């Protein structure tokens, strides 16, 4: 059994927080492949994250 204890827990989908709050600096996720998403900050690429960040079945 493999348990991932370091991965950050993220929601699979985030609302557009810039639209909601009226200013930038927020992180968003852009799903581009099954089980993978680009993290963007103000629409600039930050890093790629995998499904173990939002899917508890994969984390365990």
Image (spheres, grey):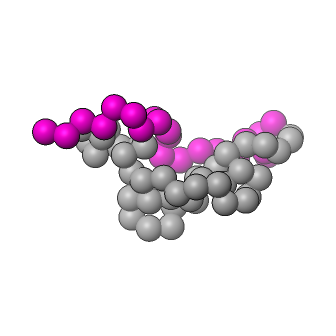
Residue 22 placed where, x, y %? 86, 40
The image quadrant where one finds the N terminus is top left
Write down the quadrant of residue 40 in the picture. Answer: bottom right
Count of residue discs: 0
Q: What's the residue at 39%, 34% (across, down)?
A: 6
Q: Is residue 18 left or right of residue 6?
A: right
Q: Is residue 17 above or below residue 41?
A: above
Residue at the front extreme, as displayed: 6
Residue at the top extreme, as displayed: 5
Residue at the bottom extreme, as displayed: 33
Q: Is residue 18 above or below residue 35?
A: above
Residues 31 and 6: in front is 6
Q: Is residue 41 left or right of residue 8?
A: right
Q: Is residue 8 above or below residue 38?
A: above
Q: What's the residue at 19%, 40% (across, down)?
A: 2
Residue 4 placed where, x, y %? 30, 37
Q: Is residue 28 left or right of residue 57?
A: right
Residue 24 placed where, x, y %? 82, 44
Q: Magenta residues?
A: 1-21
Q: What's the residue at 39%, 64% (across, down)?
A: 34
């Amino acid at each position: 059994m493999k348990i991932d204890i370091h991965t950050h827990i993220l929601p699979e989908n985030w609302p557009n927080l810039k639209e909601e709050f009226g200013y930038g600096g927020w992180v968003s996720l852009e799903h581009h492949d099954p089980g993978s998403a680009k993290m963007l900050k103000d629409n600039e690429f930050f890093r790629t994250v995998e499904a173990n960040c939002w899917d508890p079945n994969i984390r365990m």
